[in-house]
Image (spheres, grey):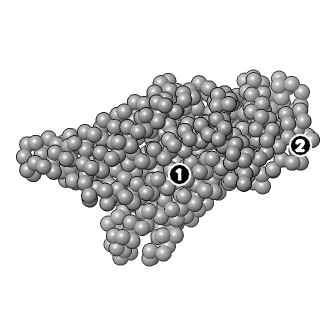
């Protein structure tokens, strides 16, 4: 049994002889910047690009399609992701009342997005490989829109469940494709910051669902959920396809045009073009990767790091804590738990925004160490406070102090998570997975993340009913293990090209 590689053939000079062997995409979403290269040297190519822009298009973008603009457009996908995650929290009572659901039926509705996301994760790598990063985002947007419409017009649980599954499928594809696309288009000096926008957008989507859910009926909230993907689809026509994907598919002229548009039409991209071509040529030397080859360092180490970080991210218990935040706050003695949950969402957005600013300055590894250390300490504090509360008289001064300490600890935990372990595992996954097995390995990593998230969400309620203090103690032990994992295994990728990172594992 073997993995099929993604290229065959040799260097660019011999691409004409191997072009017929390359797998061609069956869907290619065009962009206004695309045009034929004029041949000759890099200078003549740049000149041709400028001449062919035309006055009307040139006025749209006078120099380039910036990586920042591209990131902001595809970030609508993670906003949709976050909105899906946050929808069930403010709408629970209204949906149960309107449709006559039981609590268990609504819990099933909430969990179906994870089930759909697991299916989407399995398909995401191959979809992104065959039809491109932009094409896969279009594919993901369609079931999201249909899903929200099904929920908004639901008269019984069947449409509700179908809509949630469709949303989940789209979110599963988005959760893999967006960080990969951003990593492949971003300059090495901005890749960390732009990659962190993915997680920042998820937190913004969650916060929007919490905020709007406090003021509008649940059916209207479902209709509003259509907006991110409705804007994303036309937006994709105004940004270039990933140049690295185009190079892997053998579309060399499109690859150079895309990269030139991303870096600016006055920028000399010769060095980056050659580096990407060398990387693609290296991945073509072997078209079949056997399972025995996975033991090689060039494959095994990045696979362990990429998949391990995404599993440990969820084993920290963050999804369970956020999903049951209202009940945890209530157990801690806070009366207005919904408002507290919204406040926690605000804190998460602000902290993730700080991470976006710090990622390319402090580095991925340092932020992960700070994040997991903070998470371990804060979870120990929360665990101890709940253990003490369970053994003192309700209403006493010590009980009040422990209640406040547990609340402060939970907020500090969310801040610590957002400073590193929230965004950076997705960034590192998109940076270090080997190019010739990225589609399969990325699908496995994304599936592992969603499966672990589902298991944590399903078990968190049972664990909290068993023991609040014991639950947080277990999560603290996992975070301590994650800190050790980061110190022993995770390399620093700041300021390095994707090709340099891949070469370092050989």
Q: Is residue 280 left or right of residue 413?
A: right
Q: Is residue 385 left or right of residue 186?
A: left
The correct choice, above or below, for 147 with respect to 287 in the image is below
> Foreground residue, 339 or 391?
391
Q: Can residue 320 be seen at all in this image of the molecule?
A: yes
> Foreground residue, 431 or 472?
472
**Residue that mark 1 sits on:** 448
Q: Secondary structure at mark 1?
A: helix
- The x, y position of residue 153, in whole percent, is 48, 71
- The x, y position of residue 270, in whole percent, is 77, 24
The correct choice, above or below, for 132 with respect to 347 in the image is below
Q: Is residue 435 left or right of residue 318?
A: right
Residue 19 sits in quarter: top right
**Residue that mark 2 sits on:** 18
Identify the mark nearer the N-term, 1 or 2: 2
Q: Secondary structure at mark 2?
A: helix
- The x, y position of residue 227, in whole percent, is 52, 55
> Foreground residue, 369 or 363?
369
């Amino acid at each position: 049994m073997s993995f099929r590689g993604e290229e065959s053939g040799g260097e660019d000079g011999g691409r004409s002889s191997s072009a017929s062997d390359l797998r061609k995409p069956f869907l290619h979403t065009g962009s206004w910047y695309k045009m034929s290269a004029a041949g000759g040297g890099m200078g003549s190519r740049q000149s041709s690009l400028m001449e062919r822009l035309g006055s009307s298009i040139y006025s749209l973008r006078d120099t380039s399609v910036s990586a920042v603009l591209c990131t902001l457009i595809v970030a609508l996908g993670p906003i949709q992701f976050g909105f899906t995650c946050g929808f069930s929290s403010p709408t629970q009572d209204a949906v149960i009342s309107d449709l006559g659901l039981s609590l268990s039926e609504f819990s099933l509705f909430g969990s179906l997005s994870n089930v759909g996301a697991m299916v989407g994760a399995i398909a995401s790598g191959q979809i992104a490989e065959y039809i491109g990063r932009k094409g896969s985002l279009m594919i993901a947007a369609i079931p999201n829109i249909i899903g929200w419409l099904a929920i908004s017009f639901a008269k019984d649980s069947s449409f509700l469940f179908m809509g949630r599954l469709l949303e989940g499928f789209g979110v599963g594809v988005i959760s893999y494709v967006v960080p990969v696309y951003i990593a492949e288009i971003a300059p090495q000096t901005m890749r960390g910051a732009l990659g962190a926008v993915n997680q920042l957008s998820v937190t913004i989507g969650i916060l929007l669902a919490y905020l709007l859910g406090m003021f509008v009926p649940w059916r209207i909230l479902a209709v509003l959920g259509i907006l991110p993907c409705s804007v994303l689809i036309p937006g994709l026509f105004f940004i270039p396809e990933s140049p690295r994907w185009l190079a892997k598919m053998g579309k060399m002229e499109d690859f150079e045009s895309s990269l030139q548009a991303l870096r600016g039409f006055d920028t000399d991209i010769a060095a980056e073009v050659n580096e990407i071509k060398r990387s693609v040529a290296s991945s073509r030397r072997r078209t079949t990767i056997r399972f025995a080859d996975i033991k090689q360092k060039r494959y095994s180490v990045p696979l362990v790091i990429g998949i391990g970080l995404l599993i440990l991210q969820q084993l920290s218990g963050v999804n369970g804590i956020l999903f049951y935040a209202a009940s945890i706050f209530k157990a801690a003695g806070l009366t207005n738990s919904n408002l507290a949950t919204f406040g926690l969402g605000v804190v998460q957005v602000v902290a993730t925004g700080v991470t976006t600013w710090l990622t390319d300055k402090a580095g991925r590894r340092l932020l992960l160490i700070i994040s997991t250390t903070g998470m371990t300490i804060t979870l120990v504090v929360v665990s101890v406070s709940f253990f003490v509360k369970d053994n003192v008289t309700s209403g006493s001064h010590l009980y009040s102090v422990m209640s406040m300490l547990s609340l402060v600890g939970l907020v500090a935990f969310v801040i610590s998570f957002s400073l590193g372990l929230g965004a950076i595992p997705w960034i590192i996954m998109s940076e270090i997975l080997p190019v010739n097995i990225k589609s399969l390995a990325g699908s496995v990593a994304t599936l592992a993340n969603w499966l672990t998230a589902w298991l944590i969400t399903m078990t968190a309620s049972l664990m909290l009913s068993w023991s609040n203090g014991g639950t947080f103690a277990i999560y603290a032990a996992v975070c301590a293990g994650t800190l050790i994992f980061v110190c022993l295994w995770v390399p620093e990728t700041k300021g390095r090209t994707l090709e340099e990172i891949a070469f370092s594992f050989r």
